[in-house]
Amino acid sequence: TLLYNLFPTFYAYIINDCLVRVFAAFGLYQLLYSHILGENEKYRKTISLVCALIYCYVPFYTVYGISAAGIPLVFYAFTNLYKRNKINISYAIVMLYGLYSSFVLSGIFVCIVAFVCLCYIYFYKKNSAPHLFGAFIYLCLYYIIVNTNTIYNFINPNALSHRVVFWYDVRDA
């Protein structure tokens, strides 16, 4: 990631770990406080904060960004877009998730769930949800941009993978 180009490896790892945990706590707090716990819940803020703090200490493999830790955050953004609340912030969250997560680890599942939800909303609820559809398209585009080399290697059978290049280097040494 960009952090590993800006800082020494150890400091980049620590900064990345802290950022992932902050996004995890923020995402779950916002999701619980805004959409899951009811307005009349007496201890809504306390419950949201305690659950978010517990969630951010789950042992995520933070080298891959906010792949697993950011799922509540992206779900919060999609829920906001469906309800037409905080549209600009929600699009920014979707962009952040697309650029700072791994498509292979969690992105494909987020896209599949989002697509199934879009189909359900469009065909059964008869609601077009244009912002939700736009965020889904943007998320897919971000993943395509970030994973261009992977897609190229998958489509082109003659492309040399990093493993083959590594083997050539080891064999020639």
Image (tube, rainbow, N blue to C red):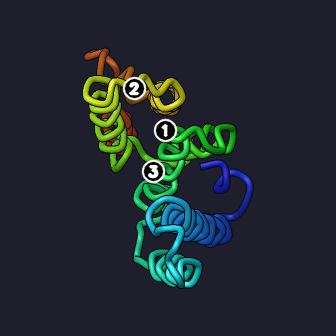
Q: Residues within 10 Å of mark 2 (few under 14, many from 20)?
A: few
Q: Residues within 10 Å of mark 3 (few under 14, many from 20)?
A: some
At 30% from the left and 43% from the top, the residue drawn is 109
**Residue pointed to by mark 2:** 127
At 41% from the left and 69% from the top, the residue drawn is 60
Circle 2 or circle 3, nearest the eye: 2
Q: CA distance from mark 2 to mark 3?
A: 19 Å
Q: Amino acid at mark 3?
A: Phe
**Residue pointed to by mark 3:** 75
Asked if residue 112 can be seen in this view, the reply is: yes
Circle 3 or circle 1, nearest the eye: 1
Which element type, helix, strand or loop, lies under badge 1? Answer: helix
Quarter of the rendering occupied by the C terminus: top left
Q: Amino acid at mark 1?
A: Tyr
Which of marks 1 and 2 precedes in the sequence? 1
Which element type, helix, strand or loop, lies under badge 2? Answer: loop
Vertical comparison of 61 with 58: above or below:
above
